Image: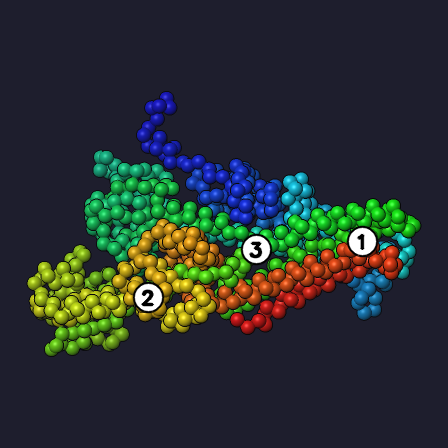
Amino acid sequence: MHKHTGHHEHRQEADVPRAAGYTCPMHPEVRAEQSGPCPKCGMALEPVSPPTSTKTEWVCPMHPEIVRDAPGTCPICGMALELRTALPADEETNPELRDMSRRFWFAAALTLPLVFIAMGHLLPGHLMSRLFSTRTRVFVELVLATPVCLWAAWPFYVRAVQSVRNRSLNMFTLIGLGVSVAYAYSVVAALLPGIFPASFRQDGEVSVYFEAAGVIVTLILLGQVLELRARTATGTAIRKLLGLAAKTARRIRDDGTEEDVPLERVHVGDRLRVRPGEKVPVDGVVLEGTSAIDESMVSGEPIPVEKHPGDRIVGATVNGTGSLIMRAEKVGAETLLSRIVAMVAEAQRSRAPIQKLADVVSGYFVPIVVVIAVVTFVVWSLVGPEPRMAHALINAVAVLIIACPCALGLATPMSIMVATGKGATMGVLFRNAEAIEVMRKVDTIVVDKTGTLTEGKPKLITILPTPGLDEQGLLRLVATLERGSEHPLAAAIVRGSEDRGIVLGEALSFESLTGKGVRGTVDGQAVALGNRTLMSDLGVELGDLVSKSEALRRDGQTVMFVAVDGMPAGLVGVADPIKESTPEAIRALHAEGIRVVMLTGDSQTTASAVAKKLDIDDVIAEVLPDQKVDAVKRLQSEGFFVAMAGDGINDAPALAQAQVGIAMGTGTDVAMESASVTLVKGDLRGIVRARRLSRQTMRNIKQNLFFAFVYNAAGVPVAAGVLYPFFGLLLSPIIAAAAMSLSSVSVVGNALRLRRVGI
C-alpha cells in the first residue's frame, strides 16, 4: 500500500525536513535533541534554525544543542528554554515568561508590606513598635517571607542545584545560595534565638533578614521578566518574514481547471496562476504573460521589474497589473524567503549575551566564597570562643551574606536600563544588551544605499531640452505621456511636473515598449521617452545627448532620452536624492576611525557615483540578499568587526549576520526587528552616538562590577574573622547586610551617572 501512495502525497511527505536541534548562543558546541537549560551557563537553549514542521521543541538561547520536547530549564546555565518555532502573532506568550511574571507579582505583593514592617521602626512615631512587639514582628516577617523565598524563588534553587550537579557554577548559583542563606539564617534566628550569643543581640533580640531575602528574590524575578520579554521579541522578525508569504496559490490542473490550494500543497513542477495584485506564491519561472513585479523585498529597489516568459520570479514578491502563469521550481524551505528566515534565525542565535561577564566573575567568586564559609565554620567550631557552634554559624553566615548576589546581579542591568533610556532620548533604540556591549568594537560599517544613504524615493532631477525647446514645454510633453504609466520613474516625473505647477494635457495612442520605454501622441505631436534602443528603433540621431547622458549617469541619475516627431528633444534624469544628513554622518564615521562600505543591489555605475560624492571607502554593488550576507561574512573573516545599516526586507539577513545590525526607523518593520539597533529618524549620525554611548556604558558596567566585587570580597575575610585574633573584631550579619546594601547603592548610583554623560 505504501509503495502505491499518490505522487502528490509522496512529495508532500518528502518536503517535511528533519529537526535541526537546539544549541546555546554562548556555547555553540553544546547540542541537544530537546529543549532545556544550557549545562554550562544556565541559559535557555534556542533552535539552530527555524523549523518547517509543526513539531514543538524547546531550546536554550545560549546552548543551542540543548533541545527538549517540553518547556524547562537548561542543564548547563539554568536559563529558561524557548520555543524553536516562531509563534504566530495570535499565539499565547512564552510559558516561562508567564510563570516568572506570576511569581514576580506574587513576590512584590508580599515583599512591600514585609519591607514596611521590617523598617517600620525607622518611621516617625515608631508605628510598628506600637502595633507589634519585637517577637510578633519577627513572626509576621517569617509568614510574609516564607512564600516568597520558598515558592517564588523555587526556580532559582532548582537551577542552582543543577549548576552544582553539572559543575558549571553561574549566576543562579549565587542567587540560590544568597537567598537560601539569608532566609535560612533568619528562620533560625526567629525560631531558635537562644543559640546566638549576646554580642549578636540588639535589645535582647537577634536580628533577622527576611526583608533582604524577599527584596533579592523580587528584584531578580523582575530582571528575569524583563529579560524574557526581550528574548521573546527576537522571534518577531521571523514572524513578520513568514507573514510575507502568500497563504494560498491558484494551481492549474492538467485538464485546464483551476483551484486554490494551501501553500503547503504546492509542489515542484506545478503550474500556478498569479493574478494582478497577488503575491507570487513560490519561486519559479514565468511560462505565459507579461507583468511588472515589485521585487523590493529582494532587491531593495523601489522600481518594479518587467517579467516575461522565461524570467525567474521570487515567492512573496508582488505582481502588478498583469496576469502570469508560472512553474513552481522551489517550494517550502527551498524558497528565497525561507532561506532568508533561516539566515536571520541563524545569525540571531550567534551572539553572546553581555551577562556572560557577570557569569565569569561568579564562576570564580562563588566557589571561593563557599570554601571560605566552610573553612570559617570549621575553624570557629574547633578553636573559637564559647559558644563555639553559635560563633561558627554566625561567622559562616556573615561570609555568605556579604557575598549576596544582589549588587553583582544589578551591575549589568542597571547600566543597560539607563543606557537604553539615554539612547532613546537621542533617537537610538537598542534592541538588547549585547548590542550595547559590542557596538563599541565596530570598525567597519556596511551601509545599504537606497533608503539608508538616500531617501528611497525617486525624484525628477534633470530636464535638459535641446536648443529651441524650453524645460517647461519638454516636461509637459513627457509628464503627459508618462501619466498613463504605473512605473515609479513615471510617477516621479509626473510628481515633478505637478510640483512645478505644469498643467498636463491628454496622451493618445499610448504604448509601453517593454525594456525600451513609452510612446504616444500629445497635442498632436509624436512623443517617445526611453533608452538608446528605443531611439535607435525610431531612427532618432541622439548626437551629443549621449555624452550628456553619461555625465548624468556618473552623477547617479537614471537618464531617459526624449524624441518629438522623430527628432531628439532632450534628456530627463531621475535620481534617488542623498539624505541631507548623510555627508555629515560619513565624515563623523571617518573621524571615529570607522571604514564605510556601501552594499547595494543597485547598478555599479550609480552606486559608484553615490560613493564618490560621499567619500565612501568601498562599494559592493549588484548583490542579492544571500550575497549581502556573504559580503558581511567575508568582511568578518578578514578580521573586521562589522555593523550593517539597512532599511529593507532584503537587508534583514545581513543585519542579523553582522555583529551589530542597524535599521533605519524609516524602513520596514522586518529590518527593524532583525536589527539590534534602530535609528528612529533614519539618520546615520546616530551610529556615532550609539558607539560613544556603548563605550561609556561598558566602562560604567565594569565600574559597577568592580564596586560589587570589591565590597563583597573585601568584607569576606573580615566576616571570616581574620581580624579577631588581633583586634577582637567580628563582622556580624548586620554589618554584612549593610555592606551588601552599600554595594547595591553604589552600583545604582554609578549607573545613574550615565544620564549625565555627554555623547
Q: Is residue 28 left or right of residue 241?
A: right
Q: Quadrant of residue 251?
A: top left
Label 1 sits on residue: 720
Query: On residue 354, which mark appears?
Result: 3
Q: Is residue 311 left or right of residue 342?
A: left
Q: Give neighbour class at mark 3: few <14, some 14-19, many 20+ (Cα, 10 Å).
A: many
Label 2, label 3: how many angstroms apart (C-alpha)?
35 Å
Residue depicted at x 24% and y 38%? 257
Label 2 sits on residue: 611
Q: Position of residue 672 (x, y in %)?
A: 44, 58
Q: Is residue 609 left or right of residue 385?
A: left
Type of amino acid under label 2: Ala
Query: Which of the two discs, 3 and 1, labels the residue nearer the N terminus?
Result: 3
Front tag of 2 and 3: 2
Helix, strand or loop for disc 2: helix
**Is residue 376 in view?**
yes
The quarter of the image holding the N terminus is: top left
- Position of 148 relative to 461 (above/below): above
